[in-house]
Amino acid sequence: KDSLLPLFFHNIETLSNTCLKMVEEVDTTSNKQQQVIIDNIAGLLEFFFSDTNLRSDKFMKNEMKFNDGMIAIQKLLRFNSIKKITTDPALLVKAVETSEKCKTILKLSEDKSSIGRLNKFDIQKIQDNIPLTLFVKGLPTVSEEGDEQNKAKSFAVQIEDVKNLFLEYGDVTLVRLRYKKKLNKSEPTIALGEAFVEYKTPEMAQKAVADLCADKGEPNKKLVLQGETLFIQPMKAWIEEKEKCKEGADAPTKKRSRDIKEEEPVEEKDNLEDGFDIVWKPGCVVSMKGLPDDCDREAIRAAIQDYHEDPKEIYIDFSRGQKTGAIRFETPNDRIIELAEKLKEGKIKISGHAVDTAHVLEGQDEKEYWENFIEFKRKQRKQQTASNRGKPKRGRFVKRH
């Protein structure tokens, strides 16, 4: 037995070393995975706070405007693209502190609860995106199953595929794929095979234009993606062409407007799908569920009277008997979030009752809310117009005999 002891202790030591090595390998793998997450977060933060995004991102601009150029990390964690990666605020802090790109453009608040830009964003000084942008046509698309009129069409390439083609000329800050505008939700999604490619500086864009675009003849270089040769032109030239086409289409319409009025019956001009539209602002709608049975619009308005100075600033989207409703504000502000939280916590009651839940609409939910509202208003206007037809116009009198 004594002779077996050295072998026993040797085996124990070997097993111990193996376990330690396995733990080290797990830690290394875990660290690598976390670093990948941090790198992905850094890339998203770099984009969200970039000139390119802030030029059109109303939510980000408003948040920064009312919070001294900072955005709370808790709000950034609500962004779908970030939420898919992490819900841990510490990883956003680490991304700002350790990422080489983030360190040069972003900063943390003293308590590390908010993120902002080192160079304050000023919309008045920001570069116009037209000198930075190229229009690209001819991107590969693929048709999905269905009849010809209702056949959806998607891009056969990814944004990264397009971006990589143009990196030769400088930093590409944005690739925006273009889709046909929908008039209602039932229409299929149709990819146009077009995109806008935006560079970081006008010099980079000009370098690409010099090589890829040609006023006359052939360009110096042609870009090909999945066998498709791309047509490329500066965004400015694309806009000018659109304006010329629009003017050409409008001219005969104006010229023949009198003939149209005389010859076409009113019923044949009933094209009201575009009769109503709205440019909505994100972060302005509070959704509520579990409203009391005796609730009405005035009860909701009275409950939230401390959150608006002018009644015209808000609209109560609610009908008697419903259990759900919404409060719409004209412009986003910090008090909207505060109102939603107090309604959710029961600190604000409607007709003496607390609602089941309340929150500020975001992302796809917010988009669907506005799409449904716009579609409802279009149908409402169409019905009103149809009911008004045939009614005598004011000022006309019927001669009696």
Image: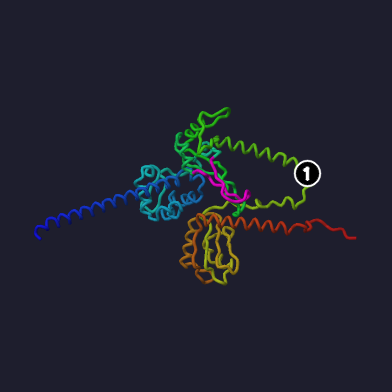
Identify the residue at the far left of this view.
Answer: 2
Q: Which color scheme did the rendering employ for the protein? A: rainbow
Identify the residue at the far right of this view.
Answer: 401
Q: Nearer the viewer, residue 398 or 151?
A: 151
Q: Position of residue 275 (x, y in %)?
A: 66, 52
Is 144 covered by the magenta stretch? yes
Residue at image mark 1: 259
Q: Position of residue 199 (x, y in %)?
A: 48, 38
- In which quadrant is the C terminus drawn? bottom right
Side of 267 where 365 appears, left or right = left
Considering only vertical position in the picture, is 32 above or below 5? Answer: above
Q: Which residues are magenta?
A: 139-157
Considering only vertical position in the picture, is 350 above or below 360? Answer: below
User: How packed is label 1: few (under 14 Cα within 10 Å), some, or many (20 or more)?
Assistant: few
Side of 248 where 58 appears, left or right = left
- In which quadrant is the N terminus drawn? bottom left
Q: Position of residue 112 (x, y in %)?
A: 36, 52
Residue at 47% x, 40% y: name it.
Answer: 163
Residue at 53% x, 29% y: name it.
Answer: 219
Q: In the figure, residue 43 lies in which quadrant?
A: top left
Residue at 48% x, 46% y: name it.
Answer: 54
